Image: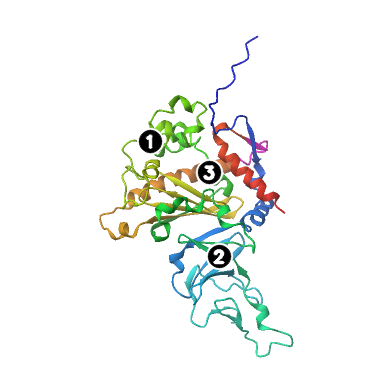
Amino acid sequence: MSANPAPARRDPGYLGLTAPVATLPAAWYFDPAQYQRELTQIWYRNWIYACRSSELADTRSFRTLEVGDQSILLVRAEDGELRAFHNTCRHRGAALCRGAAGRFPPVGIVCPYHAWRYNLRGELVQASSSQVGDGFEVRDYGLYRLPALEWNGFIFTALTADPPPFAASLDLPPERLDNWELAKLVVGHRMSKIIACNWKVFWENYNECLHCPGVHPRLSQLVPIFGRALLEQRDDPRWRDHAADDDPQYVGGLRRGALSWTMDGRPVGVPFPKLSLEERAAGHTYLTALPSMFLAAHMDYVRLVRLLPLGPERTAMSIEFLFLPETLSDPRCDLSRAVEFTDLVMSEDAAICEVNQRGLHALPHAAGVLMPEEYVVRQFQDWVRAQLSRA
């Protein structure tokens, strides 16, 4: 009989899981009833990223946002206040706006069906009937109001009157990215993709790097610790063996000589002047706002990724690249090296998420298992469970 194996060594401060953990049920990634439950309990009860404030800078400008089967109308009122409403007329429920963006005329919001008219505070100004009938009060038929807020030039809204405190929706303190001066940044490029996977599949992929060596060879060269299938130093159970080593494959950060997430590691824009030496050396700082958005802040640009669910097995992803105005006004700055690198990495992520989605349908596959490096995936799955169990 062979001797029992020696216990696994795990240095103090190790972050990974110490025992296998079951994943969420496989059916949660494709079952229509579960998808509707998640829309109701998660997407309709949390802050959702809508757009940059600059897209609603002008008085009477509007945008619509589709989340599940809900349509949200965001508008910049004459008093400068940002307001959000259900995109629904109080008469018989017609959609007020059919386009994704535009500007209302001075008369306000006019329903395209029966011409009920509202001001930009959402108050009904005029019904179109020649006689409204006894007991009808205009003040009783204002638009359905929704919360909206602006944070560092980003607009968020929610489909509930009582969303969680915004700061609690972020995985870092709101001031953590102050040195990037987010409010002054300008969108230099946008891209979008439709991914044939459940929205949770993408978030789980985002939350681990066990897949990085095989799926992201170029990224693994730029961020050597990713090439070891780790997110950070203490994901290694024996991290203390290299605690005094400054090699990026052990301590994290970009490969030696690289400064930013670009095809060649060279920055494409004007560096953010207020970054600390530590922030520059890190190469990337992430901030996540579940369920819809994460920011990746680099030394010369910030990348915003938004997810929106389109169905049990379809997710919309949009990406915005934010730069200092000086970068966009300098003809020598070539943004393409940053855009091409992101397109490569995100396309690899999208493709492998679709592979993951297809395999989940196997009849005997009731659930999977999480490995030690997937501890952040467990944190995400625990968040999903907690959201679904809320009263």
> What range of the chain is rendered magenta?
360-368
Image point 62% across, 46% down: which residue?
383
- Secondary structure of residue under mark 1: helix
* Res 132 label: none
Left or right, residue 103 beside residue 185: right
Q: Position of residue 388 (x, y in %)?
A: 68, 50
Q: Please say if the residues under marks 1 and 2 sit with CB atoms less than 8 Å apart.
A: no
Q: Is residue 194 above or below residue 71?
A: above
- The tag on residue 221 is 1
Q: Is residue 365 magenta?
A: yes
Dominant SS type (magenta): loop
Residue 17: x %, y % from top left: 59, 32
Residue under the point 66% across and 50% down: 387
Q: Amino acid at mark 1?
A: Gln
If you read the primary sequence from the N terminus, does the residue marked by circle 3 or circle 2 appear first? Answer: 2
Residue furthest to the bottom in view is 130
Residue 15 seen anywhere in this rendered image of the structure:
yes
Task: Pinpoint residue 154: horizontal percent, then vertical percent.
Answer: 48, 60
| Mark 3: few/some/many CA within 10 Å (<14, 14-19, 20+) | many
**Residue at (31, 50) in percent of width and height:** 268
Camera-side mark, 3 or 2: 2
> Which disc is residue 353 wearing?
3
Residue at far top of view = 1
* In the image, farthest residue toward the right: 134
As measured in the structure, the alpha-carbon distance from the residue carrying label 1 to the one carrying label 2 is 41 Å
Which residue is at 40% across, 53% downward? 180
- What label sits on residue 148 in the rendered view? 2
